[in-house]
Image (spheres, rainbow, N blue to C red):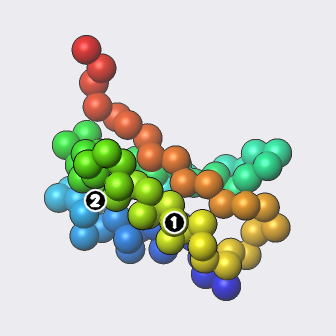
Amino acid sequence: MVEIAPLIENLVRPLVSQQDAISIKAHETAEYMAFDLTVAPEDVGNVIGRQGRVAQALRAVVYGVRSPYAKRVRLNIVDTRKKH
């Protein structure tokens, strides 16, 4: 079984320019073990990718790994960019 938070960090680290800004917070809901990924505002686009393809690929890997949690795993990418 694989620890999910280090897996997410290892997948995201090459995609971002500010690696120190990577933050992963785990919390449990009624249905999921959720992981909230936060990166620097200028790196959010790199993590999401065009039409969400990078985010979709990240989620596919994370969801496909056998985890130590009894619940399903969910990856949330927190968008910290300013909204206009």
Nearer the observer: mark 2 or 1; the answer is 1
| Residue 23 in view | no
Q: Residues within 10 Å of mark 1 (few under 14, many from 20)?
A: few
Q: Give the residue drawn at x 73%, y 75%.
A: 68
Residue 82, above or below 71: above
Residue identifier under label 2:
20
Q: Position of residue 38 (x, y in %)?
A: 40, 47
SS label for mark 2: helix
At x 50%, y 71%, the residue is 61
Q: Return the mark for residue 9.
A: none
> Which one is in front, 68 or 46?
46
Number of marks: 2
Q: Nearer the viewer, residue 39 or 58?
A: 58
The quarter of the image holding the C terminus is: top left
Screen quadrant of the N terminus: bottom right
Residue at numbered disc 1: 60
As measured in the structure, the alpha-carbon distance from the residue carrying label 2 to the one carrying label 1 is 24 Å
Q: Is residue 51 above or below residue 14?
A: above
Q: Amino acid at mark 2?
A: Asp
Residue type indicated by callout 1: Ala
Residue 11 in sight in this render = yes
